[in-house]
Amino acid sequence: MKKILSILAVSVLMFSCSGFGGEKIESEDAKSLILQVMLLCQRAMEDQLQNAMYEKDYVFANNTATMNVKFSTSCGLKTTERTAYEVSLDKWSMDAPLALTTGDLEKGTETDCKITVSGRLKGSDEVSTWASSAGSAVMCRWIFENDDTDGLTLTVYNNDTQKNVYNGFVFIATEVTASQGNIGGNFNYQARINSAVYDAPVKIWKDSYASIP
């Protein structure tokens, strides 16, 4: 009996984690589209951090989004500054050009779409610096993921054909790290969509993080 309860506890813990849950998505086109949308959503949320920094329950986007932000810093041999945020979306929307298929992605063909998202998200931006007689190094880390067991309700609407190209529940978790210093730099990224690790085309990451060396 104890063994069964332990298994159930682990199962509940696993599927309450960000990125876990929902039906498995087989389509590469759908996974590519979802990651594009989530990275655009992440950028849109990060654009509000400065405004939300000093206001609890900061409301924006015509009352469709509410954000709370926490800032922390630690000092020592390594100095780390971390900005963490939680945001609740209620039919939050934006218009953006998207590659609807992996073929479109390769050719650079984009379609004007309307993105609508409902649910809870959390993210963090973290910058760590080291300095010594041998030189200095900087590492940045970005995390973005759903914040509850219900996942997100996502709709992608093709403004040209006036039809939905995606409509469903999404569980997402992304993490990107970039480092730079006297010994060189590195860029790593990973994503999980509806419980499965997604080995996404590099172009999606490069387009989203184009300003990172």
Image (cartoon, rainbow, N blue to C red):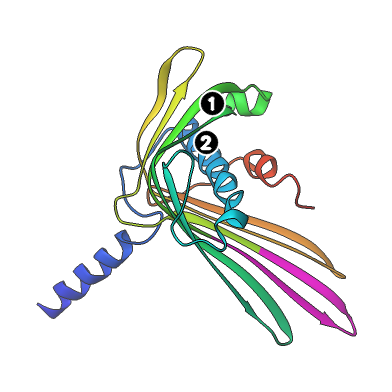
Which label's residue is closer to the chain start, 1 or 2? Answer: 2
Task: Pick out the residue farthest to the top.
Answer: 161
**What mark, if any, has residue 44 been given in the picture?**
none
Image coords of residue 11 (percent x, y): 25, 64
SS state under label 1: loop
Task: Pick out the residue farthest to the left.
Answer: 1
Does residue 93 lie above or below 80 as drawn? above
- Going 89% across and 82% down the picture, which residue do you hit? 134
Image coords of residue 92 (percent x, y): 43, 38
- Going 61% across and 69% down the picture, which residue do you hit? 82
**What mark, if any, has residue 32 been given in the picture?**
2
Q: Is residue 136 magenta?
A: yes
**Which residue is labeled 1 in the image?**
101
Q: Quadrant of residue 64?
A: top left
C-alpha gap between disc 1 and disc 2:
7 Å
Quarter of the image containing the N terminus? bottom left
Image coords of residue 160 (percent x, y): 51, 13
User: Which of 35 and 201 lies nearest the eye of the viewer?
Assistant: 35
Amino acid type at image mark 1 = Thr
Assess whether mark 2 and mark 1 are in contact (beta carbons under 8 angstroms): yes
Q: Dot 2, how many residues are within 10 Å of its Cα: few (below 14), some (14-19), or many (20+)?
A: many
Left or right: residue 153 compared with residue 106: left
SS state under label 2: helix
Amino acid type at image mark 2 = Ser
Specify the segment rendered in magenta. 124-140
Task: Pick out the residue farthest to the bottom.
Answer: 76
